């Protein structure tokens, strides 16, 4: 998670303390490299710190490895509240094109392009040109 930086020069409305959460987007080898690098940071590198020096290390990590901005929905995981948990359960259980939202999330978040391709081929008859449809 990254802090927004110094917002004191902004008008009061955009002076926010919102953080951004990023998710690793690369293959297993760069992930292992990133996982080996973080513990080398002073103190407990894996612990979240809003300190500018730690935020700088996080930005350097993001410049070196592929990350994507995570959604606000994922940020809700940091909040322990029964009504939020009930909302998430309802959304994840909602059926959409023959699968629950939770099943689609698991498929798409897995990162296995072949599994994603097979799932889309089976459900929507979507395929790469020149490749047979998976049955």
Image (spheres, rainbow, N blue to C red):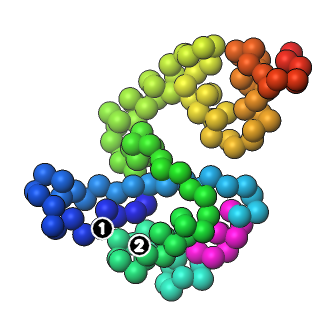
User: Considering the image in quadrants, where does the C terminus appear?
Assistant: top right
- The location of residue 85, given as percent across then percent down, is 40, 36
The residue to which callout 1 is attached is 5
Q: Earlier in the sequence, mark 2 or mark 1?
A: 1
- The location of residue 34, given as percent across then percent down, is 64, 69
Q: Find residue 131 and report its image quarter.
A: top right
Tag shown at residue 122: none
Q: Is residue 48 magenta?
A: no
- Above or below, comparing residue 69 to residue 62 in the picture: above
Q: Which residue does the image show at 41% across and 72% down from the upper left?
A: 55
- Above or below, comparing residue 2 to residue 93 in the picture: below
Q: Is residue 35 magenta?
A: yes
Secondary element under disc 2, as helix, strand or loop, is helix
* Mark 2 crowdedness (10 Å alpha carbons): few <14, some 14-19, many ≥20: some
Q: Which residue does the image show at 60% across and 14% down from the upper left?
A: 97
Q: Find residue 103 and report its image quarter.
A: top right
93, 17: nearer the viewer: 17
**Left or right: where 56 falls relative to 83:** right
- The location of residue 81, given as percent across then percent down, is 33, 42
* Mark 1 crowdedness (10 Å alpha carbons): few <14, some 14-19, many ≥20: some
Q: Which residue does the image show at 70% across and 15% down from the upper left?
A: 124
Q: Which residue does the image show at 82% across and 23% down from the upper left?
A: 129
Magenta region: 31-38
CA separation, marks 2 and 1? 9 Å
Residue that extends furthest to the bottom in the rendered view of this protein: 42
Q: Mostly what secondary structure, the magenta segment? A: helix
**Left or right: where 45 falls relative to 113:** left
The residue to which callout 2 is attached is 55
Secondary element under disc 1, as helix, strand or loop, is loop
Is residue 13 something one can see in this rendering?
Answer: yes
- Above or below, comparing residue 97 to residue 71 in the picture: above
């Amino acid at each position: 998670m990254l802090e927004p930086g110094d917002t004191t020069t902004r008008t009061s409305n955009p002076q926010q303390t919102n953080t951004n959460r990023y998710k690793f987007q690369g293959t297993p080898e760069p992930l292992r490299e990133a996982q080996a690098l973080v513990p080398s940071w002073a103190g407990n590198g894996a612990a979240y710190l809003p300190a500018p020096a730690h935020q700088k290390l996080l930005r350097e990590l993001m410049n070196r490895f592929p990350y994507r901005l995570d959604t606000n929905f994922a940020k809700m995981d940091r909040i322990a509240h029964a009504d939020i948990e009930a909302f998430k359960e309802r959304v994840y259980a909602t059926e959409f094109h023959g699968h629950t939202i939770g099943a689609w999330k698991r498929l798409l978040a897995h990162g296995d392009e072949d599994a994603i391709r097979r799932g889309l081929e089976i459900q929507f008859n979507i395929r790469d040109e020149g490749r047979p449809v998976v049955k």
